[in-house]
Amino acid sequence: MKITIHHATIFAAAGITTILLQTDRLCAADIGMTIGSQGTNQVKLTITNAVAGVAYEVYRTPVLGDELNYPWVLEHLGTVNQTNFYSYSDIEAVGFFKATTADWDGDGIPNYQDAQPNSAAIGRLTITIQFPTNGATVN
C-alpha cells in the first residue's frame, strides 16, 4: 500500500489496512510511505520521495486518539537520507506508525539534542556538571 501526500508526516498502521495523515510544515515534496510484511514478525516502512538531506524519525503507538494513555513512542531515529525502517510487528497485534522530520522546528538541531523541539527560539540542550570535578566522588 502506498500513499502520497504533500507533507512529511505520515501515519501507517501495522495491520496494513489503515493510513492516516498529518501535516508537517517543513517539507513541501510529495512524501509517501509504504508498509509491508517482512516475514512473520517484522514490517518494513519505507519513506518514498524523501527530501534529500533530511533525517526522519519514526514513532509508534498501539492506539490512536489517546495520547495520555498511549503516547507516541520513538521507534527509530533515522540518519540523514535514511528511508527504510524495520519494526517488529509482534510487540503489539495492531500498531500505528508516524514518520516526521528529525528537526521539527527547522533550527538545524536534531530533536534528540534540542532543548525544545517545537521552538526554533530555543537551541541545543547542554548540561554542565560543575561538581564533583576531576573524578571526585559524592557520598
Image: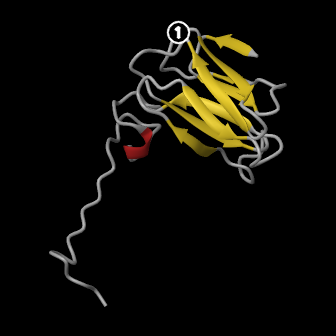
User: Residue at horizontal 65%, vertical 44%?
Assistant: 72
Circle 1 residues within 10 Å: few <14, some 14–19, many ≥20: some
In which quadrant is the C terminus drawn? bottom left
Tell whether 8 sits left or right of 102.
Answer: right
Tell whether 100 sits left or right of 40.
Answer: left
Q: Quadrant of residue 121?
A: top left
User: Residue at horizontal 76%, vertical 39%?
Assistant: 95
Q: Position of residue 40 (x, y in %)?
A: 79, 38
95 and 26: which one is in front?
95
**The furthest residue to the left:** 134
**The furthest residue to the front:** 39
55 and 21: which one is in front?
55
User: Residue at horizontal 58%, vertical 44%?
Assistant: 74
Q: Is residue 12 above or below residue 126?
A: above
Tell whether 12 sits left or right of 8.
Answer: right
Q: Quadrant of residue 134?
A: bottom left
Q: Position of residue 99 (x, y in %)?
A: 59, 30
User: Residue at horizontal 19%, vertical 77%?
Assistant: 135
What residue type is disc 1 on?
Answer: Ala
Q: How is the image coloured?
A: secondary structure
Q: Position of residue 81 (x, y in %)?
A: 44, 22
Q: Which residue is mark 1?
A: 29
Q: Give the secondary structure at mark 1.
A: loop
Q: Quadrant of residue 12?
A: top right
In which quadrant is the N terminus drawn? top right
Label count reads: 1
